[in-house]
Amino acid sequence: MQSLNRNYRSQSTATSYSEKIVQFGEGNFLRAFVDWMVYVMNQEANFNGSVVVVQPLEQGMIDHLNKQDGLYTLYLQGMKNSVAVKEHNVIDSISRGINPYQDHEAYLALSSSSDLRFVVSNTTEAGIAYDPHDKLDDRPQNSFPGKLTAFLYRRYVAFQGSCDKGLIIIPCELIDRNGDKLKKVVLQYATLWKLEQSFIDWIEECNTFCSSLVDRIVPGYPRDSIAEITEELGYEDGLVVVGEQFHLWVIEGPQWIKEELPVEVSRLNIVVVDDMAPYRTRKVRILNGAHTAMMPVAYLYGLDTVGESIDHEIVGKYVRDLIEHEIIPTLDMPQEELKSFAEDVIERFRNPFVQHYLMSISLNSISKFKTRNLPSLLEYVNRTSMIPYRLAFSLAALIIFYRGKRREESYQVSDDASILEFFGDLWDSWDGTIQTLKKLVVSALGNATHWELDLNQVPGLSDVVLKDVINIDQLGMMQALQQLMQE
C-alpha cells in the first residue's frame, strides 16, 4: 500500500506557500490545532503561509514528518450543529521539519528568513522554563526559551536590528499568561548572556509576545483503530491524528494582528482580544467546572462516562441547570455569549466518538473543585445571598465519593496521599449516626488546607451540604438527586 508522501502532494493542487511560521513542537496537539488552522486559512482566506516545525527535544518525530513530506491526515469527529460528524483531510501546511540537534545551521539559517512572521509553540507546561546552564553558543540550548532567545538574537544580527523584522510570538502551552512568562524568560537569557541593550530594546519594542488560550480535545494517534483507518484511506500514514470538531484560540494582543492572521475571513473560531482573562474564566468555570461538578454525582448515580451522563434524563438536566442557573449568572461576559459557549460545551460532552470515563477525570477532585467550582459557589452567594443548591449538592456528592464505595462496589480514589488519608480517617470515624456524619461534614468543609478558607463560615452552606450528604447516604444517589431536582 502506498505511503502518504510527496507523491500525494504532487498530485494535489497545493501551492508552494511562504514559510511564515516557525513552530516549536511537532506533537499531536499543534498538528490538530495550529497547523490545521493554517491549512484552513490557506484554503479560505488566502493566507498563503506554511509552517516550519522545529523539534524542541533531542528525541522527536521530525524524521518521520519529513519522510511524509510534512503531510498527515487529520480526523475531526464530534458534534457539529447537533449532528455527529466524522471527517478527514490531508493537511499540507507544514513545509518541512528541522532537528536543531542534528542540523543546527539550518535552524539558525531560518532566523534570517524575510518571510517569517510568527512563532508558535507547545512544549508542554514545563517547557517555558529558565535553565541557567544554557549558553548562547550551545548547539542547541537545552530549554525552549533558550533556543528561542538564540534564534531571535541571530535574527536581530542578520537584519541589523530592523524593527520590521520582529516576530509575533504566540505560545500555546497550557499555563496562564504563557506569552508573558515566555517573554520574561527570554529577557532573562538576554541578561544572562550579557547581550547588548539594543537587542533587549528590540525584543521589547519590535516583537509582540501574545498570551493565548487554546481549546480542543485531541486524543491523538488512533492506535486502536489504525487498521480500519488505513483501509478506509487507502494509504499508510504513521502520523494520523484525531481531534474533536470544536476549537477555540483566544489570542491576547493588538488588533493589528488580524491584518496578518486573517482570522475573520475564515470560518475559524479565533479571537484577538485585549484581555483574555474573561475567556479563561469562562472555560474554567463552565467547561472544567461542569466536568468536576458532574463527576461524583453521575458516578455515584451509576453512570461511567461523560457522554452517557449528559444524555441521561435526570443527570443531564442537573448538569445543564447547574451551568445555566448557578455558573453563568456569576460571570460578567455577555449572557448570549456565555449561553452559546455552554451549548458548545454540552455538545462536546455528547461527542459519541470519545469515551471519556468519569473516573479518568476524578483525579485530584478536591483541588479541581477548589479552582473550578468554589469560585462560582462563593460568587453566587455574594451576588444573591443564597446557596447554589446544585453546586452544594455536588460538593456533598464529592465528600461521599471520597468514601470509595458505589453501592456495594469499592473503587480506588486518586488524589494526593494527604487528602486520601484525611478522608480515610473521616469515614473511618463515622459510626453510621447522623451526629458523627455532621462532624464529618464540618471537618471536610473546615479544612482550610484544601479550600484556603473554612467553608463552614459561608452562611448556610454546611447545613445544605449536611442535608444532601444525609440524603445521598440514606436514600442513594438516584433518589437523592430526583428529590433535589423536584425542589
Image (spheres, rainbow, N blue to C red):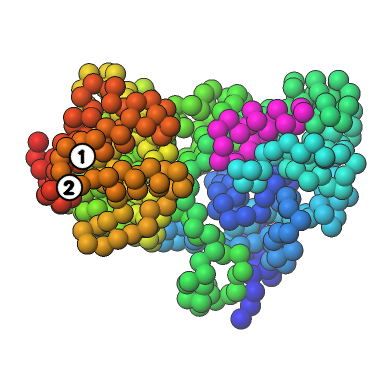
Q: Residues within 10 Å of mark 1 (few under 14, many from 20)?
A: some
Task: Give the residue drawn at x 60%, y 70%.
Answer: 237
Q: Which kind of residue does numbered mark 1 sit on?
A: Thr
Badge 1 is on which residue? Answer: 436
Q: Is residue 379 above or below residue 450?
A: above
The picture quadrant where one finds residue 355 is: bottom left
Badge 2 is on which residue? Answer: 432
- Label 2 to label 1, Cα distance in Å? 7 Å
Do tag 2 and tag 1 residues touch (Cβ < 8 Å)? yes
| Horizontal arrangement in the rendering, residue 117 relative to residue 191 (left or right) | left
Task: Give the residue drawn at x 64%, y 43%.
Answer: 126
Q: What range is drawn magenta here?
A: 169-188
Position of residue 233 measured from the top left corner of the image (x, y, whole percent): 52, 72
Task: Give the residue drawn at x 41%, y 34%.
Answer: 450
Q: Nearer the viewer, residue 41 or 23?
A: 23
Q: Secondary structure at mark 2?
A: loop
